[in-house]
Image (cartoon, helix red, strand yellow):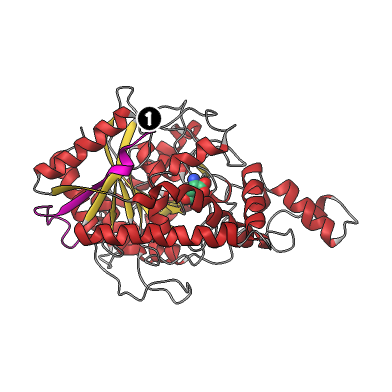
């Protein structure tokens, strides 16, 4: 059986023949059969089946159903789902239970989606391989010796292995698009502000966005139609009306100008990845798009600037995990600790080494005497990266690049070298720095059978155009 289509599942459920149960049973069966991939931290088996049965009953009674009726959806473990555990892949939040729903969870439930489980991730979304999870690694469904990417690796693996039709992730520097590329599924980081982050545990607030993983572009457009919309509970939420992103998706690419930035095809890019991505661009050209070489010169500073900005914001956001309010508390293990000792021991034991590294980096970069040299400078670079893109979008409608410089790497391969790991996001980070939307779309496999993805960027709020191009590619051009 192929991937579960959200679009087709919702349509089948509506005819009242038990489609929700069938889809959810299939997803749960796959999750059980392929449990060794480690995609889920928890499967909501019983309640998912009950909810599917209730949706089928609604369908049989002829009641109005939502746009994701009976569609199995997985949640990254940093999204709040009331009454359910949520750990951010960290020991620090072991035992924590959400007390309210994230806005995206409410939107999914309102459209009759069925939440099937919470997926593994790098601790507090810091990482590119899922190996920073405090609980388990996740394996790539295409090759279990390899990583699925990260930080939303569990979500990518769940969709790739048919355990969910849609999975939600969060993307601060590439955490949706890089794992999507490495697992062979579609992943979208929407425009900053398009999807509410109320109920997402913050990593770097000026960069974080929630977005979907799906098996095709049409499902991605359907998912965004449900997820996107103004929310007064998120102060960065854009004042825009809800939109149907399926409208116009079949418009094709005739005359569309697609920029190919030369800086994204330089040193460090795997030759098989380059070939497949260039093939995808050529396929779009064949469908009527016009390719144009462009330059995004400030891209080369993006990784360095990102690790300053993201770490600074993380050091501030993660200050709330003090053992008093959420999850693990050292004073439950040791009696007689002073408040200061309780903070230190809670954080010392609760956080893993990558999270500690980021907190220290960020605290240092923000400290008196260093602020201007690091944080302020990184913000200036960020403005230049954004300017680069805005200039590019005056000459072209979309920009096309590889998503990741290499296909999936082996478990353990980059764990001893954080810098190597950080470079996995060299092509995805600039998009977060600029606040623009980015989508990864599968474009074939290497000779060894590893999935490769290409990435489309658009101007802010140009998701409809990205879906049009992505859909044209997947329908006509086909994977190489
Ligand atoms: N891999 C990047 C990091 O470790 C991006 C993570 C993300 O997008 N959440 O920060």
How many numbered marks are there? 1
Residue 311 in percent (x, y) is at 58, 54
Residue 96 in percent (x, y) is at 64, 56
Q: Quadrant of residue 104?
A: bottom left
Q: Quadrant of residue 317?
A: bottom right
183 versus 104 height, above or below = above
Nearest the eye: 132 or 6:
132
Q: Horizontally, is 111 left or right of 429 in the view?
A: left
Disc 1 designates what residue?
Answer: 142
Query: Does 115 lie within the magenta span?
Result: no
Q: Is residue 377 among what the camera can see?
A: yes
Q: Residue at x 22, y 37 (%)?
A: 278
Q: Is residue 161 among what the camera can see?
A: no
Residue 290 in percent (x, y) is at 12, 49
Could you tell me which secondary element the residue under label 1 belongs to? loop
Q: Residues within 10 Å of mark 1 (few under 14, many from 20)?
A: many
164 versus 148 height, above or below = below
Q: Quadrant of residue 407?
A: top left
The magenta stretch is 246-267
């Amino acid at each position: 059986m192929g991937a579960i289509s959200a679009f087709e599942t919702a349509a089948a459920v509506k005819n009242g023949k038990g489609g929700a149960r069938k889809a959810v049973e299939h997803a749960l069966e796959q999750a059980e059969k392929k449990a060794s991939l480690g995609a889920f931290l928890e499967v909501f088996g019983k309640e998912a089946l009950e909810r599917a049965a209730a949706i089928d009953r609604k369908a049989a009674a002829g009641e109005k159903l939502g746009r994701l009726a009976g569609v199995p959806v997985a949640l990254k473990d940093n999204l709040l789902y009331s009454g359910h555990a949520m750990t951010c892949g960290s020991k620090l939040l072991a035992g924590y239970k959400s007390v309210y729903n994230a806005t995206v969870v409410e939107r999914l439930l309102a459209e009759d989606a069925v939440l099937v489980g919470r997926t593994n991730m790098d601790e507090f979304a810091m990482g590119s391989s899922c190996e920073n999870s405090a609980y388990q690694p996740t394996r790539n469904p295409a090759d279990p010796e390899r990583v699925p990417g990260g930080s939303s690796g569990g979500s990518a693996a769940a969709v790739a292995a048919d355990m969910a039709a849609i999975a939600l992730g969060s993307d601060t520097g590439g955490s949706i698009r890089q794992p999507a590329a490495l697992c062979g599924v579609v992943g979208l980081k929407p425009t900053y502000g398009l999807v509410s982050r109320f109920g997402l545990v913050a990593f770097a607030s000026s960069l974080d966005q929630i977005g979907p993983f799906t098996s095709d572009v049409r499902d991605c457009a359907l998912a965004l139609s449900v997820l996107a919309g103004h929310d007064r509970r998120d102060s960065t939420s854009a004042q825009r009306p809800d939109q149907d992103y399926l409208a116009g998706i079949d418009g094709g690419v005739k005359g569309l100008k697609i920029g190919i930035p030369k800086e994204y095809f330089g040193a460090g890019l795997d030759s098989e990845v380059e070939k497949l991505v260039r093939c995808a661009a050529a396929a779009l050209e064949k469908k009527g798009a016009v390719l144009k070489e462009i330059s995004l010169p400030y891209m080369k500073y993006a990784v360095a600037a990102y690790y300053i900005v993201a770490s600074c914001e993380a050091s501030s956001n993660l200050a709330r995990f003090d053992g008093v309010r959420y999850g693990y508390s050292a004073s439950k293990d040791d009696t007689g600790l002073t408040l200061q000792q309780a903070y230190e021991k809670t954080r010392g034991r609760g956080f893993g080494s990558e999270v500690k590294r980021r907190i220290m980096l960020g605290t240092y970069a923000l400290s008196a005497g260093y602020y201007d040299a690091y944080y302020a400078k990184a913000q200036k670079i960020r403005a230049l990266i954004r300017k680069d893109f805005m200039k590019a979008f005056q000459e072209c409608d979309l920009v096309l690049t590889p998503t990741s410089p290499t296909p999936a790497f082996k478990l353990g391969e980059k764990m001893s070298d954080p810098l190597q790991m950080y470079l996995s996001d060299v092509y995805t980070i600039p998009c977060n720095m600029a606040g623009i939307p980015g989508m990864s779309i599968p474009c074939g496999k290497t000779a060894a059978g590893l999935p490769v993805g290409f990435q489309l960027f658009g101007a802010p709020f140009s998701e409809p155009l990205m879906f049009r191009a992505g859909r044209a590619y997947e329908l006509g051009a086909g994977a190489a």
